[in-house]
Image: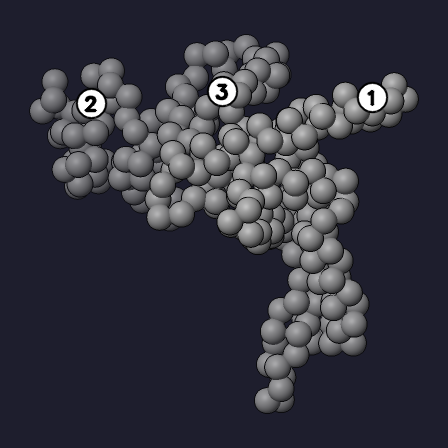
Amino acid sequence: MASHIRTSLMLLGVRNACAIANTERCISGVLIPVRHLSRMRTRTGNKGGFWIDRLAPPLFDRTAIERKLDENPDSRFDKVAPARIFQSSSAFSDPLVTKFTNMMMLEGMKDKAEEMMGRALKAVKTIQLDRYHAADESTKPTIILNPIKIFHKAVENCKPVLALAPLKRGGVTYQVPVSILEKKAEWTSMKWLILAGRDHDQKTDKFRNALARELIAASNNEGKVIKRKFDLHKQCEANKAYAHYRWSK
């Protein structure tokens, strides 16, 4: 069986021994890792190519899975690619929190970063509970107690809309205001929050408490990060006379 598979793949143009071995394991019933799929692409007579085995991307949201099954009931028989190591369908897993933890990590100490992130969210919960019990009945419904919601709201409020890009024209470098992509704005927001959390007196305060205060302040459109975003927008407004350099060659 293996010799027939190898001969067929050689006729299709697959010369890589690793790809042939992976295909043999796939046909025998063993799931292939995603990182090996690029080696299995074969070339045809035209400019394009095809995949020997097509795998559907994994879905983690229950509503997305139900929606896909309603649209195409036969999709339950599709072959699904294995999930990446950082992807999870757990109710306690959040992609944005995971990304923030990775950005906060120093020297590859992932366990330490996850512990600090968990303690920071716990500090957010403690601060909000104290504020909730101290408030009167009319303001209690407006206090958010879920630290994940506060985190998402803080990241969203800190996203800049514009940025300054240095462009050289006639031997002079101008700071030109440009629009910023969504991913870049999200990265900038989280980076500012991390830097604001680290900007504290290490002798009298801890990083998790400083980060918790910054997250709560940013969720209310207050704090150092919000001020930094407004200052950036003011600089962009002051340099709007150079905006036409953005499209010049």
- Contact, mark 2 vs mark 1 (Cβ under 8 Å): no
The residue at the far front in this view is: 204
Task: Compute the Cα span from label 3 to label 1.
Answer: 30 Å
The numbered mark, 2 or 1, whose residue comes first in the sequence reads: 2
The residue identified by callout 3 is 89
In front of the other: 107 or 156? 107
- Contact, mark 3 vs mark 1 (Cβ under 8 Å): no
Identified by mark 1, the residue type is Pro
Residue appearing at x 66%, y 74% in the figure: 175
The residue identified by callout 2 is 25
Point out the frontmost of discs 3 and 1.
Answer: 1
* Residue 11 seen in render: no
Residue appearing at x 72%, y 39% in the figure: 219
Residue appearing at x 37%, y 30% in the figure: 85
200 on left or right of 145? left
- Near mark 3 (Cα within 10 A), the count class, few <14, some 14-19 or many ≥20, is few
96 on left or right of 146? left
Identified by mark 3, the residue type is Ser
Identified by mark 2, the residue type is Arg
Residue appearing at x 69%, y 48% in the figure: 158
The residue identified by callout 1 is 141
In front of the other: 181 or 150? 150
Task: Compute the Cα span from label 3 to label 2.
Answer: 27 Å
- Near mark 1 (Cα within 10 A), the count class, few <14, some 14-19 or many ≥20, is few
User: SS at mark 2?
Assistant: helix
